[in-house]
Amino acid sequence: MLAVIRLCLVSITAISLLGSLACRTQSKPGELTMLIEKRITTFDPRVSSDSANERMRQLIFNALTRKNDQFEAVPDLAESIDAAPDYQTFTFRLRSGIKFHNGRTLSARDVKYTFETMMAKGFASDKKGDFTREDAAGKPLVAFIEAPDALTVIFRCNRPFPGLPNAIIPVGIIPEGTGEQQAKSPIGTGPFRFVSATEAQEVVLDANLDYFEGKPGVNLLRVRIVEDNSTRESELRKGSVDLAINADFEPVTVESLQKAPGLKVVITDGTNLAHLGLNLLDPILKDVRVRQALAYGIDRETIIRDIMRGQAQPAKNLLPVSQAFFEPDVTVYKYDPERAKQLLDEAGRRQQGGEPRLKLTIKTSTISISRKVAEVMQEQLRRIGVELEVQPLESGKLTQDLTEGNFQLYYRIFVGGNQSTDMFQFVYHSKAVPKNGQNRSRYNNPEVDRLLEESLTATRERQRQIFSQVQKILARDLPQIYLWYPATIAVYRDRVNGLQLNPSGDWSVVRLVKAGQ
């Protein structure tokens, strides 16, 4: 009998504990809980361009420059930018009195340290390619960086580099000497300070009360890592999460959440780019006719209507339509399975005896909407005689395989970077292969290289002509198949106020959000 009583007491205690934990899942006034759909692999702002890592950068760090509403580079930590007429020398004057989260005052030496460590030989970074890419004489684009006084930083380039103010936007500035700790214990100047991180569970940040643009609207920010779509939906419905921005919800989930009590859903046209990457070193895919056949064999309109539920716009270019240099007059691959079969015949990939014309593997993330998109493509390409194996991978493994060129096809989304023409250098120059950029397709076109190098010194009007020509060549060569611009989607509870979405879903807007009862 005593044992039964003890068991009952233990059960009651456990139930009480679970109840108290459930209560604590509700955010307190002044606190905000957000969702992120995949793991953060590093906090170091010099390293990875993965979307989850970049969102953390936007919360914890500042760069010398940032993008304005027209996607142009404007000062951030810098107070002013002075470019020499030949675009080989750039002088940045820093804002005075800015503090890092550890209390140190920002100085030019910190900027110099950040870039020099990132550009150092042996330091692995997707972001370094624009600065270290060498010319025919073996000279890197950025020659050296000077810090003549506490508030002045000078970039000296071996060649004209008018795109430098844009190229430095993704590089968060860190305090001198802190490079080793940034991956796990980041220190920046941003609106939020790092408190703790539990792998695959949660990141906790608190407000930087000394932030130079004013303290954030919330005192404590929790970023919960939830990789399963159904669990993300549940967390929002029960109130344990307040806000999700571009959290890769399935479109049918978004439709369902629009009807949920206590929740608001905002859907706006986005600028991020969903695309199919192709490995041009692959024996099958190196034939442009095969790549073009795949493009004709994908029914984008049907996927946007039935899978994306209209929450996307068709894409035919790297740049978003609102970008000033967007070129509308390019080859468009509307769904045409008969044309696709004809191209495969011309490439010697005829269908015989009911066997597939060819077999390919597509790698994608384990996120459910990505898997569904790949599975629909699998069925569509089967109709033209292409057998497609879908291989979902965890984020880290997927990034590793794409970096190493260990893929035939992949499905992924460019986040934010495609708002700038600098992305052409980063993705399509032959010397921008990982880890000097994101030319994952291993695209190599001397004409495109020449045009991109000319763009570095060209007038704005000549740049317009260059990028128009580059976009037309890429539409013909198809190192990537552009699919759609996913909508930018925010789901939030009634207690969240002041949210103003950026077209790319940039998390820097979180600084202005307020959280009530």
Image (cartoon, rainbow, N blue to C red):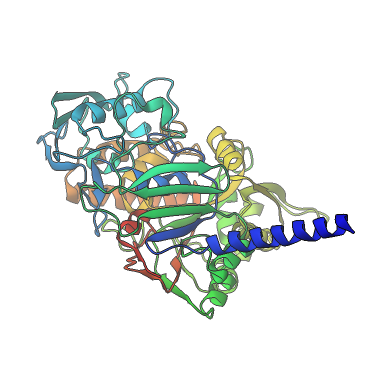
Q: Residue furthest front?
A: 2
Quadrant, the C terminus: bottom left
Occupied quadrant, residue 183 = top left
Number of numbered labels in the structure image: 0
Q: x, y (%) of residue 92? A: 15, 36
Quadrant, the N terminus: bottom right
Give 456 or 215, whichever is nearer the viewer: 215
Q: x, y (%) of residue 374? A: 63, 57
Give 88 or 446, whichever is nearer the viewer: 88
Give 48 or 109, whichever is nearer the viewer: 109
Q: Residue furthest right?
A: 1
Q: x, y (%) of residue 17? A: 64, 58
Q: x, y (%) of residue 375? A: 67, 59
Give 462 or 37, whichever is nearer the viewer: 37
Figure check: 94 above or below 353: above
Q: Is residue 297 in view?
A: no
376 with respect to 301 (left or right): right
Q: Is residue 479 in view?
A: yes
311 with respect to 156 (left or right): right
Figure check: 127 above or below 416: above
Occupied quadrant, residue 118 = top left
